[in-house]
Amino acid sequence: MKHVFGTILLSTMLLSPSALAVSQKLKIDLHAQHLKGQETLHLKRMVKRKFGQDSLVGIKLKKVEISAKSKKGHADVNLQVGFQETYPQTIDGTPETFDSDYSGFHSISLHAPQSHRDQQGPWKLHTKGNVKLDSIELTTKMQLDYNPENVSNLQFAPKTKMKVNKVVGSSKKIQVGPNFKAIQISASGKSVSITEVKVKFSDGQVVLLDELEGKVKGLKSFKFKQQLAKPIDFIKVSAVSNNIFGSRGEIQIFTAKKNGQDRDQRPDRGQRPRRDRRN
């Protein structure tokens, strides 16, 4: 009985829409901002200033990547999340390249401490030394308030298809109209894996649809609703053929429009979404 109860509990957790999330990239251009001595940048304030007051609702910081350089290669930077801080990392640079505002920058990745509790506190970037900071890009996880895989009430139409290269993979950028609601991907021929689905919104926000990544078996679907129901500039799908020998695989991309009948029901993940007619 305990085993059965545990299985039911685990299944409930897996089905819960709150367990679903997307990766979000928030880039802030600083145009070679000059920092001297010890400086602190308040990342939450900077994000809200550029992307709006609601941009941090329901997200967790994963990492921060900066583009920076120092005058003599002795400066350092570290990330603070709540009360926890990362170890300082050196910011490289030379006097010869420091004066330029357009070249000589180095990329540094700072992974956030693994504490859920501290995410509610401040996010700060601490620099020490003579530094030029060109940009900051935050990678976050955004929890969704709905199940994006539930597309049972939507009707999909073919959008485009793409032959997928081996090893290096292939990418295709698609445009969607104002009535766009969902995307669906299937594969034919050889084994294919989705490596990334990148969504660029018109307000500058960039989201990666983690739920669509991985080997394509049957249909992979994602519905845009609530936090993600806003104008889109483009969607870029990247994939790779898994088989080294033989012909390349192919993916088909379908899109669905709003039909006024969308209901967020909780489907059984053991069942595949309804296959719509495609003439």
Image: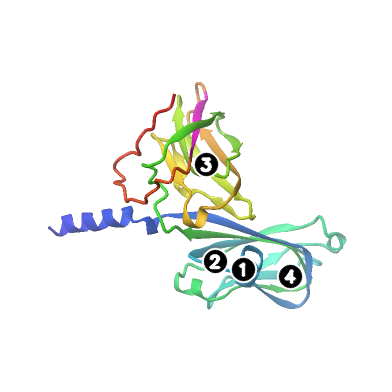
Residue in the image at 38% along x and 34% along y? 218
Residue matched to label 1: 48
Task: Report x, y in % for residue 122.
Answer: 56, 75
Identify the mark nearer the N-term, 4 or 1: 1
Q: Residues within 10 Å of mark 1 (few under 14, many from 20)?
A: few
Discs 4, 1 touching: Cβ within 8 Å: no
Relative side of 31 to 223, left or right: right
The residue closer to the viewer here, 241 or 22, is 22
Residue 75, label in figure: 4
Magenta stretch, main secondary structure class:
strand
Residue 143, percent from left and from top: 45, 60
Residue carrying label 3: 195
Question: Do labels 4 and 2 touch, CB within 8 Å?
Answer: no
Q: Eyeballing the image, is 139 above or below 172?
A: below
Q: Residue at x 45, y 35 (%)?
A: 156
Highlighted magenta segment, given as a residue range: 248-256
Mark 1–mark 2 distance (CA, rounded to whole Å)? 7 Å
